[in-house]
Image (cartoon, grey):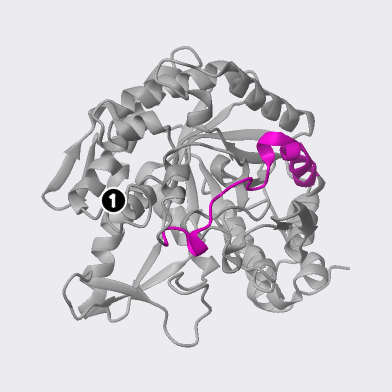
Amino acid sequence: MSDSLQVELNFPAGFLWGTATAAHQVEGGNINQWSAWEQKGGGRIFGNQVSGAACDWWNGRAEGDFDRAASLHNNALRLSVEWSRIQPEPDRWDEAALDRYRQMAAALRDRGLEPVVTLYHFTYPLWLEERGGWLCPDAPRLFARFAARVVEALGEYVRLWCTINEPMVYAVQSYLFGLWPPGRQDLGEALQVAAALVRAHAAAYHAIKPDHPEAQLGFAKHQIAFTPRWPVVDGLGAWALNALFNEAIFGAFTRGRLRWLPGMTTSVPEARGTLDWIGLQYYNRYHVRLNPCVAGAMLYEQYVPAGLPKGPDGWGELAPEQVYPLIRQLHRLVGVPIYVTEVGVPDADDSIRPGYLARSLRWVWRACMHNYPVRGFFFWSLVDNFEWAEGYDPRFRFGLYGVDFATQERTERRSARLYRAVCAAHALTADILREHAPEAISAVFEKPPRQMP
């Protein structure tokens, strides 16, 4: 029987089911380089908003959301720690902050949720910003010192560690497009920062592993599916974007060098062999076309052809089936266990999310069935949150649970009920889709599945 006729898509034993979150987006009250950027106004954040209380996790609402994750029959949850809370000054560690993170990790364990802890998710202390942020030559060493302190404090509860979240996204948004702090627009600096983040991962790995050999360290890499509008005219642009954004940094872990493009390399020998696992983060596909090259424009730009499903302006095509070739790509590039650490879609009325989730899982299942080493799936996100430059823009609500940020009230969405049923069954079935996402049946099973006797 072909996979298109399966009534049940069963996932492997030991598969992790979870959701993903990030400290600055949910905790509230952080003081870091991002909060300073928010305070500058000037349209840097949607509606000149500030993160404020966010989802109020730091003041005690985290545990209520952990209960929600457990109610989804999840067995894991990805969260991050805030560097600026733990090390507010270069030579001062806040033990109360470490105690709060220990409390969170223990609370997850108590609920049967394995903590997957990200050490750097786009934010760092103001004292590091004053030294130049990731352009500071000493930044990788400083990060490794911080990471080792966190692992020492939380290692009792945490096995899986994500050192760096989306290094290329951070480098591009902050140092090429200038949309995130510090608002730079310099390709050379963007590549320098990407290399620094790779060095930071390697430095953390070497600082942690000797004392904590049981710790499993990886990082989360955002991959974009690039498709040329015309293979001959735009093929080179799609190839170059894939080489720069998707593939370049992985050479550091296999050959000790980042190969940006032919003739453009950066040596990082210390990174070789420092990946225990890799996280795939996928959201959309970009169709690439030649730009007429007006002054200041990129040579190639992304667009969405008419008739294809797309997210908010600039988001790209919603193409969940692309998660499968991207899993294959990561396996080819590094050959280590893979966690899908983020998949999600902005959808305030939850009309798209259930089908997107179901279709994504169908292709993750296929990768598992083809023996790619996929170990878990983390949906972005458990709750609506502060979405970086998009702030609290209602077009960028990602949560399985909606959040009223004025009252902190949570509202369960249809996609949460779908995910609960899938995780409870450890499978995606036709019956689950009929109840929670009937619009996805034909896409997931390709033909209406026969009911088993």
Q: Is residue 438 above or below residue 31?
A: below
Indicate the quadrant where residue 194 lies: top left
Decide if residue 98 is on the left or right side of residue 185.
Answer: right
Q: Is residue 115 above or below residue 373?
A: above
Q: Residues within 10 Å of mark 1 (few under 14, many from 20)?
A: many
User: Residue at 79% across / 60% down in the picture?
Assistant: 417
Q: Is residue 130 above or below residue 396?
A: above
User: Residue at 74% across / 51% down in the picture?
Assistant: 408
Question: Where does residue 353 sit, x and y in percent of width and height?
Answer: 65, 67
Q: Nearer the viewer, residue 145 or 212?
A: 145
Q: Is residue 395 above or below residue 31?
A: below
In this orientation, does residue 362 appear? Answer: yes
**Main SS class of the magenta portion in the image:** helix
Q: Quadrant of the N terminus?
A: bottom right
Question: Where does residue 409 sit, x and y in percent of width and height?
Answer: 78, 54
Q: Quadrant of the C terminus?
A: bottom right
Residue 451 shown in magenta: no
What residue did someone put label 1 on? 175
Residue 50 shown in magenta: yes
> Which residue is outermost to the right?
453
> Which residue is outermost to the top?
211
The residue segment tinted magenta is: 43-70
Question: Where does residue 158 sit, x and y in percent of width and height?
Answer: 61, 26
Decide if residue 423 is on the left or right side of residue 358.
Answer: right
Decide if residue 183 is on the left or right side of residue 383.
Answer: left
Question: Where does residue 412 sit, x and y in percent of width and height?
Answer: 79, 59
Q: Nearer the viewer, residue 269 or 396?
A: 396
